[in-house]
Image (cartoon, rainbow, N blue to C red):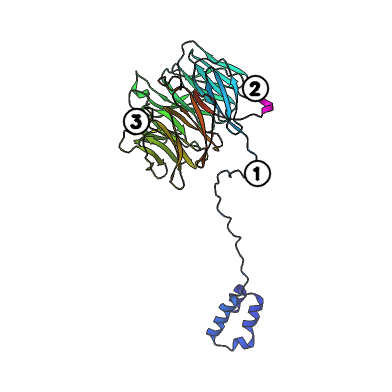
Amino acid sequence: MRTMWRRVFPSSVQATLTSAKARTLPGFIVLALMLGLGGCRPKTHEPPAPPPTRVQRPPEPTPTETLPALAVVYQEANELRCWDPESDKAWTAADNVPGIAEAAIDPTGRWLAYTNEDGDLFVLDLESGVQRTVRDEPGATFLTMAWARAGEKLAFTADGQLLVARAPDWQARMLVEERECGWPTWSADGKEIAYGLRDADDSKGKGLWAVSETDGTPRRLAPGTGDIFAAARPVYSPDGTWIAFEHSWEGGSLNLVRSDSSKYRADICEGSNPHWVNDDVVVFRVVAEAEADGLWSYTASTRRAERLCSRGQWVDFAVDPRGEGVALLQSNAGGDNAAAKVLWYDMATKQVTDLGSATCRRAEGPLFSEDGRLFALATYGPDPELPQAPATQGAIRVYRRASEHVADSEVVCERLIGWITAETDSDRGEAE
């Protein structure tokens, strides 16, 4: 017994239990003392576990924080112009630009790519004003173009072929010579381009493909169906794991495929124009003619589709870059009493807020600024002097996400293009 005590208890406890008085006690009392006094042994405490890591969104700017000014880029006649809604000042970014067909601003707000009706593609540096010709082939048909997230790289299709151009020289380089490519989109890391392919001679060639920008080797991600584009409007999830796309230009169905092609979920439900809210949730629209019209979401991890809201005819929508909500443009276009209504859907509360409406013949947008602070739309109405003429001239309306209508422009807008970080007056000279 003494040997066991020496192994289990400290010396002070051993002395107590081996004393003469302790040895005269009954055995069960001695055992109780052994157990009780042993409990007085100092305990070693494990350090507290660190709190779980929580992924947080960028904090909202404080009222005292100075934020860069923003400007909307738009087309007026043969000019590309900018308008700062805070100062209500406008200036010309590029003039003598006839017949703009398509235009897109890179995510950094520095580069503007645009095409004209003659088949020319240009990139304009909005900081320096220097313009470069990317492709000059009379009669070329440009279908779509897409910027990499970090800017400085542009993917585009010309006559169905997929090409890429990079700063600073912007020389076009062929990636895919197939003549049925469309809807290019960059991967999250900017190393790969996904695109849709229609192959009229070989149905097995249809579907969603991806090509590395460096080695130019295409690989097929998902098969396709239909006689138009089997994979339209592909878009990578923010973490690059999934690609959402639709079957055919007309809206067909929503599809998801892993970017490594390991999983493919075909024809999940009716839907078109997918936009990712976060790494797991994609929102899309179902056309008004369908039985389940409106705005829907699909969660990749749970495979659950859910209707978010259904109100009238959806013209277009855009997801807040922070992933907190969706700006929706609702319209009853046609007739003299036509109007465009602006709505905000909050992803957390699942509530719809009416941000007001404007009388117009048609509307364009919404378009978010890169930081998600503001979004803009253009409303086009009849010319007072030519009320029967097509609605080609309009005004720009700016909103601050879910809260309020911020400003209306007095500029004449013919096409809404996007947002840039506005320069100071000293940088751009005297504003008009």
Image mark for residue 296: none
Q: Is residue 65 left or right of residue 303?
A: right
Looking at the image, is mark 1 or mark 3 nearer the viewer? 1
In the rendered image, the residue lying farthest to the left is 291
Q: Residues within 10 Å of mark 2 (few under 14, many from 20)?
A: few
Q: Position of residue 184 (x, y in %)?
A: 47, 25
Q: Position of residue 39 (x, y in %)?
A: 58, 75
- For badge 2, the amino acid type reads Ser
- Find disc 3 in the rendering and name its residue: 252
Mark 2 or 3, nearer chain start: 2
Q: Nearer the viewer, residue 4 or 167?
A: 167
Q: Nearer the viewer, residue 325 or 239?
A: 325
| Secondary structure under the numbered disc 3 in the rendered image | loop
Magenta segment, which residues?
423-429
- For badge 3, the amino acid type reads Gly
Q: Nearer the viewer, residue 291 or 331?
A: 331
Residue 428 on the magenta span:
yes
Question: Which quadrant, please, contains the C terminus?
Answer: top right
> Is label 2 in contact with label 3 (beta carbons under 8 Å)?
no
Instruction: Give the quadrant of residue 29.
Output: bottom right
Instruction: Give the quadrant of residue 336.
Output: top left
The residues tagged by marks 1 and 2 sit, at their Cα atoms, a distance apart of 31 Å
| Secondary structure under the numbered disc 2 in the rendered image | loop
- Find disc 1 in the rendering and name its residue: 64
Residue 43 vs 23, above or below: the answer is above
Residue 74 vs 292, above or below: the answer is above
Residue 416 in sight here: yes
Mark 1 or 2, nearer chain start: 1
- Find disc 2 in the rendering and name its residue: 128
| Secondary structure under the numbered disc 1 in the rendered image | loop
- For badge 1, the amino acid type reads Thr
